[in-house]
Image (cartoon, grey):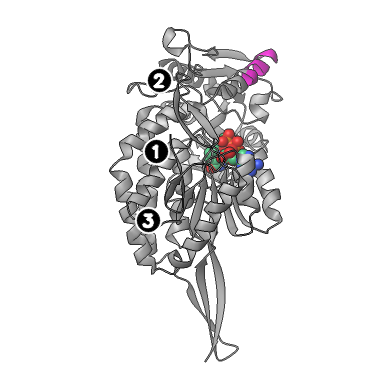
Amino acid sequence: MAKMLINGERVDAASGATTDIRNPATGQHVDSVPKADAADTRKAIEAAAEAFKNWSKLAPHKRGQMLMQASACARAKLDDVAQLLTQEQGKPIRDSRIEAERFADNIEIYAGLVNGGAMSGKHVPLPAQKAMGLVVRRPIGVVGAIIPWNFPLTLMANKIAPAMAVGNTVVVKPASTTPLSTLRLAELMLEGGLPAGVLNVVTGPGGVVGEELIRHPWVRKIGFTGETGTGKQVARSAADELKHVTLELGGSDAAIVCDDADLDVAARNVAIGRFFNAGQACLAIKRVYVFDSVADDFIARIVARAKRLKLGSGMDDSAQMGPLHTEKQRAEIEAQLADAVQRGGRVVAGGHRPSGEEFSRGYYFEPTVVVDVPDDARVWTEETFGPLLPIRRVASLDEAIDLANSSEYGLGSSIFTRDMAKAQRAIDELEAGYTWVNAVQVAHDELPFGGTKHSGYGKEHGTEVLDYYTEQKSVVVAT
Ligand code: NAD
């Protein structure tokens, strides 16, 4: 059975309670993990607070060195980690390998940035007095990192890599269904020399472990990724302790396909954007607005791509799309599709659970495209977290931008056009934290990432994330 990691020790929950982890492709038991309670969580917080005393005082380059060594140890076993990720999450093994690599990349990027002066502040002349002004950066303290199940490793790295590099210590709470790859990576980092207590992992229910992290006064910062509804609850609970919070929440990203677009580029990037990770990505393209004059051609290209995608168990190297993560997730997509069809929508690709023995025990659903769906249908107003793509015809860029902005979400957005004036309008007017122009909708480690409106606040990635894991202090030195 897998164990939690608290203060450098592999431990069970004090109560002995456990949670079973099952493979979404087969329903088979993969392993069990401890089911922690609030008292277990407090032990991890106390360990992180104790470790902070030394970790935060290390010379930044020394922390960078230790993180590089820990990452090297993890890198040597990334294939094991990827296997665990596919078994617990369901995604194709090649995607799990990329995700595990990105974890190590992220640790190394921020370890390197620390060496390059991530902790540097600035000198500000104070002409009014004989004095020198300085702005210095300090770590915040103990960080709680609360992670969802769709990209457990990259979303953990987005928080813990910058947090640890600048001197904070961390307690990670993975999603209840995807703790195994997280625990394995944390173990490898400790084997690689990370001091006890700097990185702790507590497994258990969000309402218990997550809530304790958010309410405990010693945790000074919460990095949260998850649903908008949960994020609002996190913000309310964190308010009592006036805690720093970064909220990376849900999305309903729109892609606009203009009449002058390269339709092949648009269809390829929209298909990847919608069906990657079986559509279970915050940054997935969840709505398409296509100019009427090219709509038939574009829809035909997307339908062909959807039909070509090879479904299969994540452990099958040739599979391009695995099952959905849970039965609940599949039922939700089926309900959203049924709502669209009941209102008059037409399914032009997919729409069913695939038949065949190999699919009978997993939560599979075909890549699905639906057209002629009225604007009040759930697929336009809610987040669709699965392989379901609604496409709507528009008469103009004005109409497309208005519809794109009609969502309460504001995470990502895309436009496909050869006309830079149209692209400029999209960049200026789309209400989102990211706009891709003729590009595939993936987040780059180098660029700040985070939403607006109900998609949350705060940034991950880039150098901008450092502002969210440090506090700035002003200093005046009379001369
Ligand atoms: P979720 O909100 O159900 O759970 C996220 C995490 O919060 C889990 O670890 C869960 O155990 C924990 N949690 C649940 N209740 C809690 C509480 N009361 N207090 C503290 N923690 C609690 O989300 P999910 O279903 O795991 O993930 C899918 C959602 O995440 C989608 O909405 C998706 O768009 C969003 N997401 C956003 C981003 C982003 O960067 N913006 C990235 C990936 C996923």
Amino acid, disc 2: Ser
Which of the marked residues, 3 or 2, is nearer the chain's N terminus? 3
Q: Quadrant of ligand 1?
A: top right
Q: Is residue 343 magenta?
A: yes
Numbered mark located on residue 99 in the image: 1
Looking at the image, do the residues carrying marks 2 and 1 touch, with CB atoms under 8 Å apart? no
Q: Position of residue 419 (x, y in %)?
A: 49, 38
Residue pointed to by mark 3: 194
Residue range highlighted in magenta: 335-344
* Crowdedness near tag 1: few (<14), some (14–19) or many (≥20) residues, C-alpha within 10 Å: many
Q: Position of residue 179 (x, y in %)?
A: 48, 37
Q: Position of residue 9 (x, y in %)?
A: 43, 49
Can residue 368 be seen here? yes
Q: Chief secondary structure of the magenta span? A: helix
Q: Gap in Å between the C-alphas at discs 3 and 2?
A: 35 Å
* Crowdedness near tag 2: few (<14), some (14–19) or many (≥20) residues, C-alpha within 10 Å: many
Which residue lies at the image location 50% right of the left edge and 16% below the top edge?
366
Mark 1 within 8 Å of ligand 1, using the beta carbon: no
Residue pointed to by mark 2: 313
Secondary structure of the residue carrying tag 1 is helix
Mark 2 within 8 Å of ligand 1, using the beta carbon: no
Q: Residue furthest front?
A: 15
